[in-house]
Amino acid sequence: MGITLLGSRLAEPGTEFVYRGESSACEGCPYRQQCLNLAEGVRYEVTDVREGGQVLDCAVHDEGVVAVDVEPAAVTANVPSKGAYAGSKGKLAGPCPHTECPSHEFCEPLGADFEEEYQIREVVGDPPHDHCALDRELTLVEFAAGEE
């Protein structure tokens, strides 16, 4: 668990985001140390908003930033069914152009890269689609959180 600064609009318990690193607008900001303290590419969940914290001006977030507690969040993803079981390693099947598919957000999930292997924490079951347009045999899983 960590503390960081997050845009006021996003500062709600349960909000998930992928930390993308420093913006060019961060240069010279006095709050850089409190803001730029997460691991790039990791998906985080806001667990608490610090009570009584003031809203600080920010060049990236138009309504300023506030202090929040965050922890790495699990990523739910579709992986090739072969070898997909809790405790095994899994990789995403690859990019998919079918953005209208109900499984697209799980085939290209935020917070996971196509080149990386991830520890499968849990097998969720069948993906939400009825038929894969790319004829992939997929299983919906939950990857272990980024820093577990």
Image (spheres, helix red, strand yellow):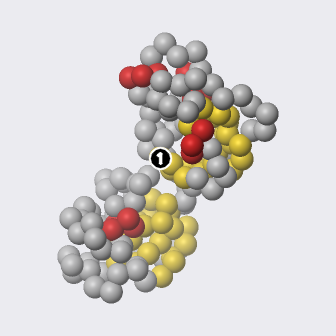
**Residue drawn at the location 66% of the way across and 29% of the way down:** 55
Residue 82 visible here: no
Quick check: 52 above or below 79?
above
Percent position (x, y) of residue 103?
A: 36, 73
**Residue corresponding to mark 1:** 18
| Percent position of residue 107, x then y | 34, 66
Type of amino acid under label 1: Val
**Residue nearest the viewer, comparing 98 with 132:** 98
Left or right: 117 in relation to 16: left
Q: Examine the rendered structure and indicate whether residue 85 appears above or below residue 50.
A: below
Residue 98 makes an appearance in the image = yes
Q: Secondary structure at mark 1?
A: strand
**Residue 141: image x %, image y %?**
47, 72
Task: Please name the residue shown 56% across and 37% down the image.
Answer: 7
Q: Nearer the viewer, residue 74 or 54?
A: 54
Front position in the image: 91 or 95 = 95
The local crowd at label 1, few if under 14, some if 14 to 19, many if 20 or more residues have their Cα within 10 Å, is: some
